[in-house]
Image (cartoon, helix red, strand yellow):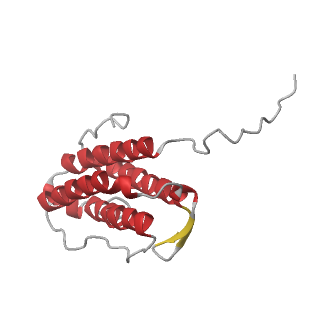
Amino acid sequence: MKNEVVEPTTDVAQTAISSKDLLQMWQGHRKLTRRVIEKFPEKELFSFSVAGMRPFSDLAKEMLGMARPGLDGIITRKWDAYSDAKSISSKEELLAKWDETTAYIDENWSKIPTGRFQEDDVAFGQWPGKIYWMMMYFVDNEIHHRGQGYVYLRALGIEPPFFWER
């Protein structure tokens, strides 16, 4: 039996994941990353690194700097400058900003125009591609940096949260 390519009919949706499911996936990753932040002792969150990598606080600030401005760019088609939240200097501030951003994402996700995920744009004036690709980049970037956080926690003798508990 040959493998045949079956072309979709015009009434089949052209998405592999719904907007609602994409939001749930992203927020699941954000909840897990928040738990990684919580595991860090205050001092090590801002100072500990391995092999010259940035401290986890800097990585979390980068994620914050992409999340809200990235969502705003997707919604408005106007991409403000990427911001890495440099002014955050305590674990309490970082977690508060994380929670504020999470709530902002939930409150504004529905403002993404229908069909927007298939449109081309240039995120932050530097990354061209489809909007769905940009969303996946935001998530991939977070997973990548969270993995660094797991290495740091293990090097500090701290058990990180289970990665599958999103």
Closer to the camera in the image, 60 or 83: 83
> Left or right of 73: which side holds 59?
left
Name the residue located 20 percent from the left edge and 53 percent from the top edge: 99
The image quadrant that residue 83 belongs to is bottom left
Name the residue located 57 percent from the left edge and 41 percent from the top edge: 16
Q: Is residue 20 above or below residue 54?
A: above
Residue 105 percent across, percent down from the top left? 31, 55
Residue 52 in view, yes or no: no
Looking at the image, how many numbered discs can be counted on the residues?
0
Residue 47 percent across, percent down from the top left? 22, 64
Farthest residue toward the top?
1
The image quadrant that residue 67 belongs to is bottom left
Farthest residue toward the front?
11
Residue 88 in view, yes or no: yes
Name the residue located 20 percent from the left edge and 46 percent from the top edge: 39
Name the residue located 57 percent from the left edge and 62 percent from the top edge: 119
Residue 34 percent across, percent down from the top left? 25, 48
Residue 1 percent across, percent down from the top left? 87, 22
> Left or right of 49: which side holds 130?
right
In the rendered image, the quadrant that contains the C terminus is top left
Closer to the camera in the image, 78 or 44: 78
> Left or right of 109: which side holds 35?
left
